[in-house]
């Protein structure tokens, strides 16, 4: 407020993440938001966490619809189709682990710091994808699966330890990452071909992955020249308040409102974001 040279009286509404997420964190935020809304007589706007990640892209580009969002984080991996600015259709999602969760687990067995996915990405730059790993087999054409790939890495390390064989951690990190990102992009390519959106965006913490950003900016952009591709700035990939403000402003325009009975919803579905 100080930087914007505003006061709470100048604010149109108070936006807050209602879900999904950890119940304690959500509860603290909602209590604070309800207090502000009550104290300053402002409308309360509940926002879905993933809608916030998608709208983080609006900080760098005007979103065009229909739009396809690839949501990748520690808790989510899904393809979301938006016909207009406040409609959400989940085309496919992970059947087991989210890609961020799988990356963190692989990082742990490689004895990397937490969060492991960040360090797997860095280590992979030093290696080559030379180790064969299990290829995921999701059921739906737009779905994802990472549990088998994660287990394949664990089993590979276990076999090497049993046979006293050495492996190159950087090569294993690179092999895992290339398999995981291939699993991401295969359904994404299919969705781009079938739905022909005007724009595709990345959303979520794993959108900070340097190799994923490279593949989207170079390979996908070259394959689909008529589609505009947008990647959020690194500062807006992880959870932040700005993305909730942007999504909240759109929700506000579409009449989404909460009252003082609003409560945290750790299992909130994206379709519920319409209000």
Image (cartoon, rainbow, N blue to C red):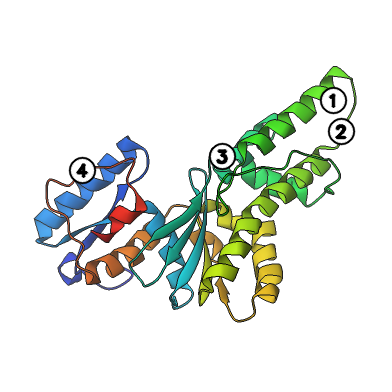
Label 4 or label 3, whichever comes before in sequence order? 3
Label 4 or label 2, whichever comes before in sequence order? 2
64 relative to 158, above or below: below
Q: Residue at x 43, y 71 (%)?
A: 58
Q: Position of residue 265 (x, y in %)?
A: 28, 42
Label 4: few (<14), some (14–19) or many (≥20) C-alpha neighbours in 10 Å: some
Residue tagged 1: 160
What whole-number distance in Å separates the C-alpha atoms at marks 3 and 1? 24 Å
> Is 100 situated left or right of 241 in this image?
right
Quarter of the figure with residue 82: bottom left
Residue tagged 2: 167
Q: What count of labels does the image hold? A: 4
In which quadrant is the C terminus drawn? Answer: bottom left
Q: Secondary structure at mark 2?
A: loop
Question: Does the rendering let one see residue 236?
Answer: yes
Label 3 or label 2, whichever comes before in sequence order? 3
Label 4 or label 1, whichever comes before in sequence order? 1
What whole-number distance in Å separates the C-alpha atoms at marks 4 and 2? 50 Å
CB under 8 Å between discs 4 and 3:
no
Instruction: In the displayed orientation, state which residue is furthest to the bottom.
Output: 226
Q: Secondary structure at mark 4?
A: loop
Residue 101: numbered disc: 3
Q: Position of residue 59 (x, y in %)?
A: 44, 71
Label 3 or label 1, whichever comes before in sequence order? 3
Residue tagged 4: 263
In which quadrant is the N terminus drawn? Answer: bottom left
């Amino acid at each position: 407020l100080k930087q914007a040279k505003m006061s709470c009286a100048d604010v149109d509404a108070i936006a807050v993440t209602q879900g999904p997420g950890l119940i304690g964190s959500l509860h603290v935020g909602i209590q604070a938001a309800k207090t502000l809304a009550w104290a300053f007589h402002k409308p309360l706007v509940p926002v879905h966490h993933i809608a916030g990640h998608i709208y983080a892209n609006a900080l760098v580009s005007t979103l065009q619809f229909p739009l396809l969002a690839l949501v990748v984080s520690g808790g989510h991996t899904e393809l979301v189709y938006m016909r207009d600015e406040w409609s959400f259709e989940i085309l496919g999602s992970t059947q087991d682990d989210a890609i961020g969760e799988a990356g963190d687990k692989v990082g742990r067995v490689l004895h990397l710091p937490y969060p492991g996915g960040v360090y797997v990405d860095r280590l992979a730059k030093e290696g080559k994808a030379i180790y064969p790993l299990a290829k995921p087999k999701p059921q739906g054409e737009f779905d994802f699966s990472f549990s088998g790939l994660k287990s394949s890495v664990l089993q590979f390390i276990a076999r090497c330890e049993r046979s006293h064989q050495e492996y190159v951690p950087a090569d294993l990190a690179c092999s895992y990452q290339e398999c995981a990102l291939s699993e991401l992009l295969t359904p994404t390519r299919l969705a781009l071909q079938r739905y022909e959106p005007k724009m595709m965006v990345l959303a979520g913490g794993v959108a900070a992955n340097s190799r994923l950003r490279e593949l989207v900016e170079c390979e996908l952009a070259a394959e689909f020249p008529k589609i505009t591709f947008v990647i959020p700035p690194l500062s807006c990939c992880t959870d932040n308040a700005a993305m909730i403000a942007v999504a909240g402003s759109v929700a506000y325009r579409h009449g989404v409102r909460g009252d003082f009975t609003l409560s945290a919803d750790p299992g909130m579905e994206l379709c519920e974001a319409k209000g």
